[in-house]
Image (spheres, rainbow, N blue to C red):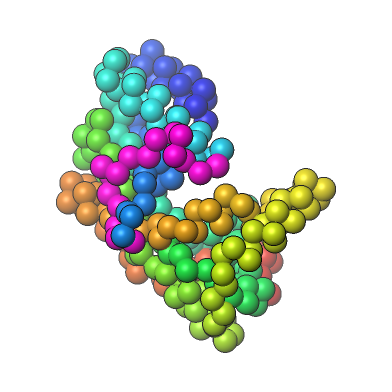
Amino acid sequence: NREGTRLLMQAALAAGVERVVYTSSVATLACAANGGSADETMRLSESCAIGAYKQSKVAAERVVETLIGRENLPAIIVHPTAPIGPRDQKPTPTGRVIIEAASGRIPGFVDTGLNLVHVDDVAIGHLAALRFGKPGDHYILGGQNVLLAEFLGQIAVMCGRPPPKIRLPRRLLYPCAVAAEVMAHVTRREPFLTIDGLRMSKYRMFFSSAKAERDLGYKARPYPEALKEALAWFRDNGQLR
């Protein structure tokens, strides 16, 4: 993430690119300590980032900021939250939660939350940043802050299943995460439950898109619309019965 970003941004400078929209992540922002909504000013240091992915995203973002300051790289930095919707082929981690919950394989939940946004709104937000964004500025492209219990409940309702009602103590899940990661080394398949994921779940990952709404004209539709489209796409593509 870091060196690939450096090479790409240096190539953009050499080519005289007029504007760059750099896709970062809310993974580079710190969560609000009181469970409120974080904004673009709440920056995370690499040493405080949980896991290799977040550390690499912070490091890559700092490369972009350095080139903005030293070489006038005309870059606008956007921070998508957790996108959901159709065409999630891999699927993404959030997409896997949708599939597993819709299949009835998530019996409980931990006390955490996340910000859900339709993937098409994130794409539209990128175009708005290209047109109206100020080089050097950061913009969160998010949707709604949702508790995990509410998210799983919404999936259950849409699939005609009873919602999970068991609140799971986080500390009891760490042995399961260790086992899942060990099995992942054997099966070469990405684990559904990870130690880093559990560590992050201590925080409510809530964010505000107020700056993007004000400066870019950004808008996000209600997350159940994205969830409905995601479920339909997963069914149509054989990932969900």
Locate residue 164: give its quadrant: bottom right
Q: Is residue 7 left or right of residue 234?
A: left
Residue 148: image location, x then y, percent: 47, 69
Residue 236: image location, x then y, percent: 62, 68
In this orientation, which residue lies closer to the viewer: 10 or 18?
Answer: 10
Question: Is residue 64 magenta-colored?
Answer: no
Q: Can you see residue 33?
A: yes
Residue 210: image location, x then y, percent: 22, 54
Give the residue displayed 44% in from the left and 34% down from the top.
46
Give the residue displayed 40% in from the left and 31% down from the top.
61
Question: Which part of the image, by quadrant, shows the C terminus?
Answer: bottom right
Extreme-right residue of the structure: 186
Locate residue 132: give its quadrant: top left
User: Vertical placement of 128 versus 228: above or below?
Assistant: above
Q: Can you see residue 102?
A: no
Give the residue displayed 27% in from the left and 20% down from the top.
69
State which region is magenta. Answer: 35-51
Give the residue displayed 36% in from the left and 17% down from the top.
13
Locate residue 104: give its quadrant: bottom right
Number of numbered discs: 0
In this orientation, which residue lies closer to the viewer: 218 or 42?
Answer: 42
Q: What's the magenta bit mostly, secondary-structure-wise?
A: loop
Q: Is residue 111 left or right of residue 178?
A: left
